[in-house]
Image (tube, rainbow, N blue to C red):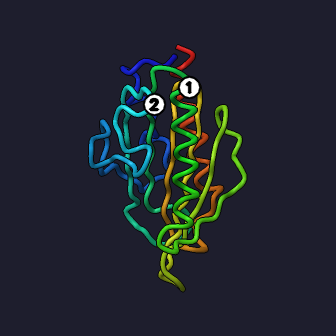
Amino acid sequence: MVPVSALSKLVLQPADLPSGFFPFDVGKQVTVDAPPGQRASPTRFGREGGWKARYRRSQPAGRGPFIVESRADLFAADEGAEDDLAALRTQLTGEARAGGVAVRIHPEPDLGEEAVAASTLQGSGTAALRFVTIGWRDGNVTASVLVAGTEGGLTPADAVRLARKQQGRIEKVASE
């Protein structure tokens, strides 16, 4: 079991990102960071705490992500993390029905014990933005990576690469 004291180690660190990224919001998840729906409560499913790290690239043009958000939530028991990932899956598929946003569910990446991946597209043409979310569960931890970039310049594989780095951090802390 991962302890609450290790939360800050469970998210992406500056060294995990390509050069040119800098943090703009790192720390304990607070009320304003709460996701919508079933996941809004800070005590949902026996949640004990959460951490987030947000980064942006100094030059947003080009291929790959220009915004990266890494999150980790810790639960008293594995079952709480299972319920949280199920709620994230519901949240992502529910977005497909809300407001006409086109959500594409991708094959589950091989991360943790189970995972979900989805992307949305906002806007059109050269100004279109692609958002890719990868969420997964490992023991009593749920984690997610959200990346944003230009349509045609960002792929789900970009998000999966970062999620694998974060999963490596989770595995390291869990084995200590």
Callout 2 touching callout 1 (CB < 8 Å): yes
Q: Is residue 86 above or below residue 171?
A: below
Alpha carbons under labels 2 and 1: distance apart = 8 Å
Foreground residue among 17 and 92: 92
Q: Residue furthest left?
A: 31
Q: Residue at point 51% right, 53% down?
A: 91
The residue that appears at 44% across and 45% down in the rendered structure is: 38
Q: Is residue 47 or residue 68 the one in the foreground?
A: 47
Which residue is denoted by mark 1 in the rendering? 79
Disc 2 secondary structure class: helix
75 to the left or right of 29? right
Residue 136 in the image: state x and y as whole percent: 59, 39
Which dot marks residue 45? 2
Q: What amino acid is labelled 1 in the image?
A: Glu
Horizontally, is 80 left or right of 30 in the view?
Answer: right
**Residue 32 percent coordinates (x, y):** 27, 49
Q: Position of residue 106 (x, y in %)?
A: 68, 57
Residue 89 falls left or right of residue 99 = right
Near-viewer residue (2 or 161): 2
Mark 2 burial class by Cα count in 10 Å: few <14, some 14-19, many 20+: some
> Of the residues shown, which amino acid type is indicated by label 2?
Phe
Is 74 or 47 nearer to us in this picture? 47
